């Protein structure tokens, strides 16, 4: 008979089946998204492209809100900086992946500088600091006309190119955005589900305890903010490639608030929930709002109230609760 001590010492079996199912789900979802332009009209394909861009922004914000516990109202600053940097680079002769890389690097550097101050605060103080950072970034975009184009924005951004092919059609632009969307989402999942993700959740739950265990919590939070800012910069570069225009509104409070709204609606801490929330935000604000005589924001506000009242943990948590029961 196996003793109690032997039972406690026995290592747990790895849950390989869960990983296999997850990989299968990711592959199936990617294939389904890749096939979408074959069956959708050009306008619907463009809308789906916007959803992917905004979904990646929301997912990067979710790393801060749901994993680290740092709610931000200035995340659009990194999104907009990435968009401006990628657009400026593309206009000056380096379109495609090179422009995206510049946008990612510049957004990460801005996040590093801003985060060095912001991560020393927490709670509502961190929230207000990020709001101030977002407002300062929008004012800079609005007044630095020689680089950003001022209130008119940067327009005439060339279409991205891939292996010498200009991707100027809705379907080809969509596939271009989808490829980098998958890369960004996988990077976010890798960080949030690996050992760094465990540390980040520990800081979210009890920063004092993690500090007592020897973790440099301020530096770790700064690293998470820089990484989230870099992914937001990638989303911004994809925005510039998709709409071929970047304006100060892309850096402003409204964009940050909508991204946070998408995270709350989809479910904080969920990997794919913020993307679902982003889809609902885009569809309600743009598509449904056009049929409601411009009352998209009102419909979006009603949706938010209903989700918070009926599903306070977000839409994605419905499936998670059922799987746990």
Image (cartoon, rainbow, N blue to C red):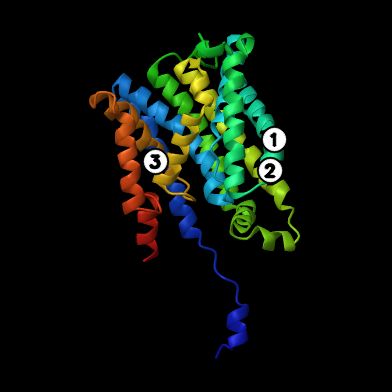
Residue 153, visible in the rendered structure: no
User: What residue is shown at x 52% (from left), y 49% (from top)?
Assistant: 66
- Quadrant assignment, res 98: top right
| Image quarter (top left, top right, bottom left or bottom right) of the N terminus | bottom right
The reply to whether dot 2 and dot 3 touch (C-beta < 8 Å) is no
Q: Earlier in the sequence, mark 1 or mark 2?
A: 1
Is residue 280 rendered to the left or right of residue 65? left
| Image quarter (top left, top right, bottom left or bottom right) of the C terminus | bottom left
Label 2 sits on a secondary structure element that is helix
User: What residue is shown at x 69% (from left), y 30% (from top)?
Assistant: 109
Query: Dot 1 corresponds to which residue?
Result: 112
Residue 127 picture location, percent across and down = 57, 42
Label 1 sits on a secondary structure element that is helix
Q: Nearer the viewer, residue 98 or 70?
A: 70
**Residue 212 higher or lower than 179, as above or below:** below
Q: CA distance from mark 2 to mark 3?
A: 26 Å
The reply to whether dot 1 and dot 2 touch (C-beta < 8 Å) is yes
Mark 3 Cα-neighbour bin, 10 Å: few <14, some 14–19, many ≥20: many
Q: Earlier in the sequence, mark 2 or mark 3?
A: 2
Query: Dot 3 corresponds to which residue?
Result: 277
Extreme bottom residue here? Answer: 1
Query: Dot 2 corresponds to which residue?
Result: 222
């Amino acid at each position: 008979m196996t003793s109690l001590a032997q039972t406690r010492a026995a290592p747990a079996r790895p849950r390989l089946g869960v990983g296999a199912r997850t990989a299968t789900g990711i592959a199936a979802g990617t294939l389904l998204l890749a096939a979408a332009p074959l069956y959708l009209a050009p306008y619907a394909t463009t809308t789906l492209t916007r959803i992917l861009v905004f979904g990646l922004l929301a997912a990067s914000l979710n790393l801060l809100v749901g994993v680290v516990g740092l709610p931000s109202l200035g995340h659009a600053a990194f999104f907009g900086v990435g968009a401006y940097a990628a657009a400026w680079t593309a206009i000056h002769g380096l379109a495609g992946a090179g422009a995206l890389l510049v946008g990612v690097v510049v957004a990460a550097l801005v996040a590093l500088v801003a985060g060095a101050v912001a991560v020393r605060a927490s709670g509502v103080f961190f929230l207000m600091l990020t709001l101030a950072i977002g407002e300062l970034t929008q004012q800079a975009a609005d007044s630095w006309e020689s680089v950003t184009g001022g209130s008119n924005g940067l327009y005439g951004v060339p279409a991205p190119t891939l292996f010498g092919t200009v991707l100027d059609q809705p379907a080809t632009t969509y596939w271009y955005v989808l490829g980098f969307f998958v890369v960004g989402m996988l990077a976010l999942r890798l960080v949030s589900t690996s050992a760094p993700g465990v540390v980040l959740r520990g800081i979210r739950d009890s920063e004092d305890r993690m500090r007592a265990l020897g973790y440099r919590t301020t530096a770790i939070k700064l690293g998470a903010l820089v990484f989230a800012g870099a992914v937001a910069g990638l989303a911004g570069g994809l925005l510039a490639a998709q709409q071929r225009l970047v304006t100060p509104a892309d850096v402003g409070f409204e964009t940050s608030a909508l991204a946070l709204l998408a995270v709350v609606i989809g479910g904080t801490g969920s990997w794919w929930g913020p993307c679902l929330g982003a889809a609902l935000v885009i569809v309600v604000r743009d598509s449904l709002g056009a049929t409601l005589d411009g009352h998209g924001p009102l419909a979006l506000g009603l949706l938010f109230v209903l989700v918070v009242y009926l599903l306070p943990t977000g839409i994605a948590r419905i499936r998670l609760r059922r799987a746990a029961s």
